[in-house]
Amino acid sequence: MKRSFYILVILLCFSIHSYSQFDSLKSEILSYEDTTAVTIKKGRKLLLESFQKNDRSKVLQIITYLTKQVENEDYLALYPIEQEMINYWLGQYNEVDSEVQKYTDFYLTKNEKKLRPQTDLLFEKIKAYMKDHEKEQISQIERSKLSEEQKSFLKINLTFLSSDYKRSAPLQDTLNDLTSDFIAKYPHSKYETYLREQIRWAFKPSKWGYGFEFFTGYGVFTKTLSQQFQNSIPIGVAFEFMYKKYALYLRDYIGFSHIKEDLPFQAATWSKGKQARVYLPELSVGYVCTKSDKLKVIPFVGISSTDITPTSKDQSDYQGYSDIGWTFTTTYTVGLNVDIRISKVNTLLVRRQRIEKSYSFLKVRYAYNAPQFQNKYAGLNGDMHYLTIGFGIFGRMYNRD
């Protein structure tokens, strides 16, 4: 009995001790404050107040303290863009220059891994000020004793920093023109990498493009073929691949026709009125000779193969029909494509440095096809002209320039 009592007392003491430890830990957790994060939060608040009071001396002191004493490998006190804008405001252009030279992939990646400041109004307020006082800032730059290259860069960068995050196309075009002019005027400038990677968002088209098309139309036979078959109405699909101004077409023309007269074969007679299928797979190449925003004209030549046979159903329903008709025979093709754009160009961001531009089009295509049936079947000759109208989509990749 005594032994059981002692065990109970020991367990009770252990429980009280454990509870006391957990309660102490809970209090420690609740009272804990991240002093670095709190210092950054309060420092940024004081920085904003000093900025709004136009206290430049105080702003400079706070920035120096936050960036030199508080910020470390784990915490970010000020975003690089905030430092740039404040240095513009302070007229510390050498500091702007120094900050710009840090803009490397390593530097940006390193900052992304740090704990960022809590959300506040510092960035928005400074940016709004810079936007409202851009002309004053430019005048201040012009009065400085910097080189013309530095002044030109600082003005371009100021326009960039003052712009909205989602810049309009006209503004981005302006920035692209300014940076292009700067790079042309100052080749091998130390600012070139920054201008190209951070400000200039210009894209140049890839050499390759690609398209897809559904089409229908009308095919006309000549000579013997016209006596034996009605003109065909096709459906088909086509793929196209562009390299610079050269085009490669892969097309599959399936024509629907009927027999005009009985056609005797060794296996069976192909009866008048029966359906016929005209298969014309094609490989052709073309060259863009005329191009505008709405129109593209491409003459082409190629090789294909013509097959005129009964339908699959008739081949299974009628004895001997699987062995009649004119099987795939070499065919030479020449013609003209006219592509008419019918939609706006859509832009899709594929990756940060790459976009795709695509649009829908109507393709009007004329082709003259010369099947070499006479070399394979005695007494059979004739050609086929066709005109098709297709609906398709064409796209091309654009890489960051």
Image (cartoon, rainbow, N blue to C red):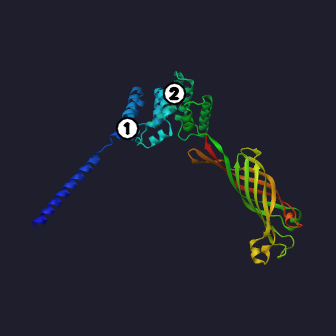
Vertical relation: 26 (above or below) 48: below
What quarter of the picture does the N terminus occupy? bottom left
Q: Most extreme residue toward the front, as rendered? A: 375
Residue type of the residue flagged with mark 1 = Ile
Q: Few, some or many C-alpha atoms within 10 Å of disc 2 (few <14, some 14-19, many ≥20)?
A: some
Counting from the top left corner in percent of width and height, residue 78 is at 42, 36
Residue under the point 50% across and 29% down: 97
From where the camera sits, is residue 109 visible?
A: yes
Kind of residue at badge 2: Gln
Q: Quadrant of the C terminus?
A: top right
Left or right of 147? Residue 343 is right
Q: Quadrant of residue 186?
A: top right
> Residue 129 at x, y = what percent?
48, 32
Q: Which label sits on residue 40?
A: 1
Question: Quick check: 129 above or below 205?
Answer: above
Residue 26 in picture, x, y percent from top left? 27, 50
Q: What residue is drawn where x is 61% and y is 44%?
A: 399
- Comparing 215 with 162, the one in front is 215
Is label 2 in a helix, a strand or a loop?
helix
Question: What percent of the width, then of the height, locates residue 27?
Answer: 26, 48
Q: Is residue 340 above or below residue 323?
A: above
Q: Is residue 276 visible?
A: no
Q: Which residue is mark 2?
A: 137
